[in-house]
Amino acid sequence: MQSRKKQIIETAAILFKEKGFSAVTMRDLAAALGIKAASLYNHISSKQEILKAIIIAIAEDFTAGMKNIMRSNDNAIGKLEQVIRLHVSITSSNIYGMASLNNDWMHLEEDLEYYLKLRTEYEDDFRMILEEGIEHNEIIDSNVEVMLFSILSTLRSLYLWIPKKENLDKSVLANQLSDVLLKGINK
Amino acid sequence: MQSRKKQIIETAAILFKEKGFSAVTMRDLAAALGIKAASLYNHISSKQEILKAIIIAIAEDFTAGMKNIMRSNDNAIGKLEQVIRLHVSITSSNIYGMASLNNDWMHLEEDLEYYLKLRTEYEDDFRMILEEGIEHNEIIDSNVEVMLFSILSTLRSLYLWIPKKENLDKSVLANQLSDVLLKGINK
DNA sequence: GTCTATAAATCGATAGAC
DNA sequence: GTCTATCGATTTATAGAC
């Protein structure tokens, strides 16, 4: 990808995190880059193409990461720890893009169906890990959907919290999250 | 409040959840109500007033609920269980409004500062409960911010998951959440 | 209380000069 | 690769008839 195009997409992601896709105009984006709106179209074909570039790339990263985890020989708890590390890793290197993935996916047009397919597959794999853990007596036999929802909500919100941490150590954060999410906070 | 105004605000919240505040036009809203856009202005003064009505009311409900919990004599775990019930209660009766509270607060104009004040106070109270629990040996002495982030992310995402549950029993859900959030999923 | 008509501003995107 | 100029559509909101 050309360097200028990449710069446009990265700058767009920053603005999209602040106000959302719909509230950011091509003039806003151009101004942030120090050019005029018309000049953007020498590098990208539409606002929609920018959104697609941001969201689909990250969604495919999650899919690839999850497929690797499913292929591993770890037990359920080990797989969950891998999933947590996957979220910390992808999120910390795509803080702005994660905001679009979480909040602006419904504005995808041609790629909406594809995005939803990736998301459903991801959640299905996640659920399978939990069910496998219950079956093998590693995980409490509580409501699977509540556990899935609880862990995934936390991991999907990481993009809001990681920027507030100074001197982020990704492996320390992943370990703390594993502790809290798997073992709870009760003493 | 007049019945028609209430109906407009409730319908707006439904549309805001689907596409976000910025992507919903006054024509969309009017069409959903079976009238013309101009007719909306006989009941409300601006699109901004609708957003404010949705968000501030819920934010004040959370503030009032948290103040009650802070005044109670429960220990830290008991207070956390109350907070979980507060989120389940407010969210289940404001599914659509919670989407705006979470995703469209940045589009508030005159009331943005007030909203941020309420949110900060809420998080400070939440943090105090956790710190009190650590001090009294009820809660593990782990990273407070990670615990706060983890629990609050889950509770703030409830509006996405509650609609998927059929035959919702609020007290059952609150108990399941308390189990998972406080005791973890590890066996 | 809803309508038609419209104002004034802004939107994404294109044409063509340099 | 960026610019000026502009198109055509759409935005929030208002005026005034009914």
Image (spheres, coloured by chain):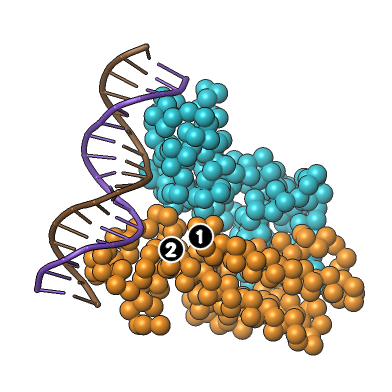
Chain colours: A cyan, B orange, C brown, D purple
Residue A40: image location, x then y, percent: 43, 29
Quarter of the figure that contains the C terminus of chain B: bottom right
Identify the mark nearer the N-term, 1 or 2: 2
Q: CA distance from mark 1 to mark 2?
A: 8 Å
**Mark 2 falls on what kind of element?**
helix
User: Is A93 on the left or on the right of A44, as rendered?
Assistant: right
The residue to which callout 1 is attached is B109
- The one nearer the camera, B73 or A19, is A19
User: Is there CB contact under 8 Å for labels 1 and 2?
Assistant: yes
From the viewer's side, name the closer residue of A134 and B129.
B129
Helix, strand or loop for disc 1: loop
Residue under the image location 52 percent in, 29 percent down: A34
Q: Which residue is mark 2?
A: B48
Instruction: Specify the farthest residue to the bottom.
Output: B73
- Is residue A9 positioned above or below B2 on the image? above
Q: Residue at x 59, y 76 (%)?
A: B60
Residue at 64 percent across and 80 percent down: it is: B64
* Residue D13 to residue A117: above or below: below
Percent position of residue B4, x then y:
33, 79
Q: Is residue B122 left or right of residue D4?
A: right
Q: Chain of mark 2?
A: B
Left or right: A157 in relation to A15: right
